[in-house]
Image: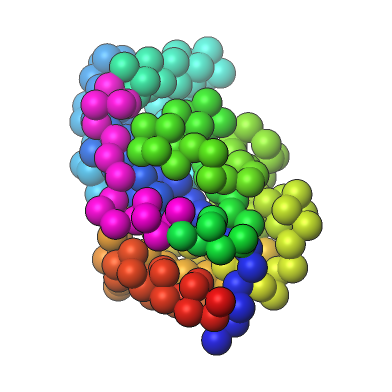
Amino acid sequence: MTDFRTVLFDLDGTLIDSIALILASYHHTLAAHGHPPVPDADWLRGVGTPLRVQLAPWGSTPELLDALVTTYRAFNLEHHDRMVRAYPGLNQVVRAIHGSGRALGIVTSKGREGTLRGLRAVGLDGLIDVVISADDVDRPKPDPEPVRLAVERLEADPATTVYVGDSIHDLHAGRAAGVRTAAVLWGPFARTQLEPGAPDFWLERPDDLSRLILSSS
């Protein structure tokens, strides 16, 4: 068993239960701009990629795309604290990992403001050593740049780093960055949807994360 000294997390669908809010925000945005609805499954395929990438098909000009992003963010922020939840048992595991002296990082395709608000909403602010958001990189996930940047800023060893995520984009980014990957199954995706990402570890429950990280202490 690898003694992981650095644990990187995706945010939405991994550390915070925000998927219902994300889907509601996309549906509101298209409706507000006069577009027909898109099935949840289509939006979910893009979870883990930046907002502007998801909305690009409806933003034929930079101005239209900016307007879509503005609408999404306004709705998302208005309803954020009411709709975002912690996954049962996960906060305790994250606190225990933090208390063990390991370095913790967030690698997300969300903007920095929304990321910090999400961490505050579930009581995980103050536990994270570095946050890499969509605002910090030129090439977001599934490109390895965000994961590599987190490893660099933490001065971590890729060989003792694991990236924990819920989407195929997380798994591809982590593998390409040379760290180990762990796929969580408490997010919106089933095991069959994540298998093409060939994760090193499967985490069905937060207790599995505790065993993976803390059993080697």
**In the image, is residue 77 part of the stretch drawn in magenta?**
no
Question: In the displayed structure, does residue 81 sit left or right of residue 170?
Answer: left
Res. 76 image quadrant: top left
Q: Position of residue 29 (x, y in %)?
A: 31, 21
Q: Quadrant of the C terminus?
A: bottom right
Q: Position of residue 92 (x, y in %)?
A: 37, 55
Question: In the displayed structure, does residue 147 sit left or right of residue 61?
Answer: right
Question: In the displayed structure, does residue 27 sit left or right of residue 201?
Answer: left
Q: Quadrant of the N terminus?
A: bottom right
* Residues in magenta, as a range: 79-95
* Residue located at (45% from left, 29% from top): 117
Q: Where is 107 relative to 75, above or below?
A: below
Q: Position of residue 35 (x, y in %)?
A: 27, 22
Res. 72 image quadrant: top left
* Residue located at (50% from left, 72% from top): 213
Q: Nearer the viewer, residue 184 or 211?
A: 211
* Residue located at (45% from left, 54% from top): 95
Q: Nearer the viewer, residue 25 or 186?
A: 186
Q: Where is 211 relative to 150, above or below?
A: below
Our reading of the magenta stretch's main secondary structure is helix
Res. 17 image quadrant: top left
* Residue located at (49% from left, 37% from top): 125
Q: Return the residue found at the far front.
A: 99
Answer yes or no: is residue 96 visible.
Answer: yes
Answer yes or no: is residue 199 visible.
Answer: no
